[in-house]
Image (cartoon, rainbow, N blue to C red):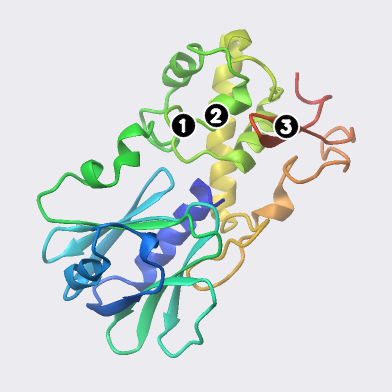
C-alpha cells in the first residue's frame, strides 16, 4: 500500500505536471472507484471546465484544489492505486479505472489492480470532511509543527496495544504505514511488541525523530517499490534498497549482523532486529 512518502512523491509530481491545464472530459471504466457523487456521470460533468490550482496531501489522501469553482477532487490510492500522467493515445492498462482528459493530448489515468482506490468530487461550499469522511479521523501529520514529543507521548500512553499496532492507527500518526513503522522502530531501538503502556518517556523523542527521518529519506528516494508503486511518470521508487529491516527477513542486520526476524502483529508483518531493538 502506498504510504505517506509514496503519496507525497505523487503529489509533488502532480504539482509539476498537471496544473493550470483545463479538464476537458474523462471516462469512468469502473463505477465504484467514484465514491462521490453517486451518479458517476456527474463526476465528469462537474470536473469539465475546471483546472487544478494545486495538489495537497492529508495523511494518505490527495486533494486537488480546483479553479475557478473552488471545488475539490479527492483521491485515495489504497492498496494498489496509481495516478499516471500519460498521452491519451497510450494503450490502456487492463486495470485502468478512471481517465481524466487535460487539453487535447494528456490525461491523468487512475490504475488500480485491487480496485480499493477511490475518487471524490467535492462541490463548492461543501466541507471536504463531509464528503471524504476519512479525513475527519486523521491525526496530525508527522511533518506538522503539532507532531511534538508531548503529542506523541499523550497519544501512545492511552492504550495497551503493541507500539507497532498503535503506529499504524491513522488517528495517532497520519500517513504512517507498515513499512515506515518498522523502519522507525528499528532506528529508535524499540521492539514492535513493546506495549504502549510500557514505553518509557525517554523513548518517545527518539521514536518521533526516527519517524520523521525515515519518512524524509524515503521521500528523497522517491518512495518505496516493493510491490507496484509508480510515480506519476511511471517510475519506481528507490527507498527499498535503503531499508534497514523491512522485507529483509533472514538477512544480516546492517548495524550488528544479527539475523532480521519477522512476526505477525495485528495481521501485519513486523520486521526487526532483536539485538538492536529492546
Q: Residue at x 15, y 56 (%)?
A: 123
Q: Residue at x 64, y 29 (%)?
A: 266
Q: Residue at x 62, y 54 (%)?
A: 224
Looking at the image, tell me whether mark 2 or mark 3 is earlier in sequence order. 2
Q: The C terminus appears in which quarter of the rendering?
A: top right
Q: Nearer the viewer, residue 35 or 248?
A: 35
Name the residue carrying label 2. 167
Q: Nearer the viewer, residue 54 or 269?
A: 269
Q: Secondary structure at mark 2?
A: helix
Q: Mark 1: give few (<14), some (14-19) or many (20+) Cα within 10 Å.
A: many
Residue 158 vertical position relative to residue 188 in the rendered view, above or below: above
Question: Spatial distance from mark 2 to mark 1, Cα to Cα?
Answer: 6 Å
Name the residue carrying label 3. 264
Looking at the image, tell me whether mark 3 or mark 1 is earlier in sequence order. 1
Name the residue carrying label 1. 173
Q: Secondary structure at mark 3?
A: strand
Q: Secondary structure at mark 1?
A: loop
Callout in the foreground (3, 1): 3
Looking at the image, tell me whether mark 2 or mark 1 is earlier in sequence order. 2
Q: Residue at x 30, y 41 (%)?
A: 133
Residue 56 vertical position relative to residue 127 in the rendered view, above or below: below
Q: Measured from the top left, where is residue 232 in percent x and y?
A: 47, 69
Q: State yes or no: discs 2 and 1 in contact (Cβ < 8 Å).
A: yes
Q: Mark 2: give few (<14), some (14-19) or many (20+) Cα within 10 Å.
A: many
Amino acid at each position: 500500500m502506498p504510504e505517506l512518502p509514496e503519496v507525497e512523491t505523487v503529489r509533488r509530481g502532480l504539482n509539476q505536471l498537471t496544473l493550470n491545464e483545463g479538464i476537458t472530459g474523462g471516462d469512468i471504466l469502473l463505477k465504484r472507484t467514484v465514491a462521490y457523487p453517486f451518479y458517476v456521470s456527474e463526476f465528469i460533468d462537474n470536473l469539465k471546465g475546471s483546472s487544478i490550482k494545486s495538489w495537497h496531501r492529508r495523511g494518505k489522501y490527495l486533494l486537488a484544489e480546483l479553479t475557478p469553482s473552488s471545488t475539490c477532487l479527492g483521491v485515495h490510492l489504497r492498496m494498489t492505486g496509481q495516478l499516471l500522467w500519460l498521452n491519451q493515445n497510450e494503450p490502456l492498462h487492463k486495470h485502468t479505472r478512471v481517465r481524466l482528459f487535460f487539453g487535447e493530448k494528456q490525461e491523468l489515468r487512475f490504475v488500480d489492480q485491487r480496485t480499493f482506490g477511490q475518487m471524490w468530487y467535492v462541490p463548492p461550499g461543501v466541507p471536504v470532511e463531509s464528503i471524504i469522511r476519512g479525513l475527519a479521523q486523521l491525526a496530525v501529520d508527522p511533518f506538522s509543527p503539532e507532531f511534538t514529543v508531548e503529542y506523541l507521548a499523550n497519544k501512545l500512553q492511552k492504550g495497551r496495544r503493541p507500539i507497532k499496532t498503535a503506529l499504524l492507527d491513522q488517528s495517532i500518526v497520519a500517513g504512517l504505514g507498515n513499512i515506515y513503522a518498522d523502519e522507525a522502530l528499528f532506528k529508535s531501538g524499540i521492539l514492535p511488541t513493546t506495549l504502549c503502556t510500557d514505553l518509557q518517556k525517554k523513548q518517545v523523542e527518539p521514536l518521533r525523530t526516527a519517524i520523521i527521518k525515515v519518512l524524509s529519506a524515503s521521500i528523497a528516494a522517491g518512495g518505496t517499490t516493493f510491490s507496484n508503486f509508480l510515480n506519476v511518470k511511471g517510475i519506481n521508487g528507490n527507498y527499498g534498497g535503503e531499508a534497514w529491516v523491512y522485507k529483509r527477513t533472514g538477512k544480516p542486520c546492517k548495524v550488528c549482523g544479527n539475523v532480521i526476524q519477522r512476526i505477525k502483529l495485528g495481521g501485519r508483518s513486523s520486521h526487526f532486529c532483536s539485538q538492536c531493538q529492546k
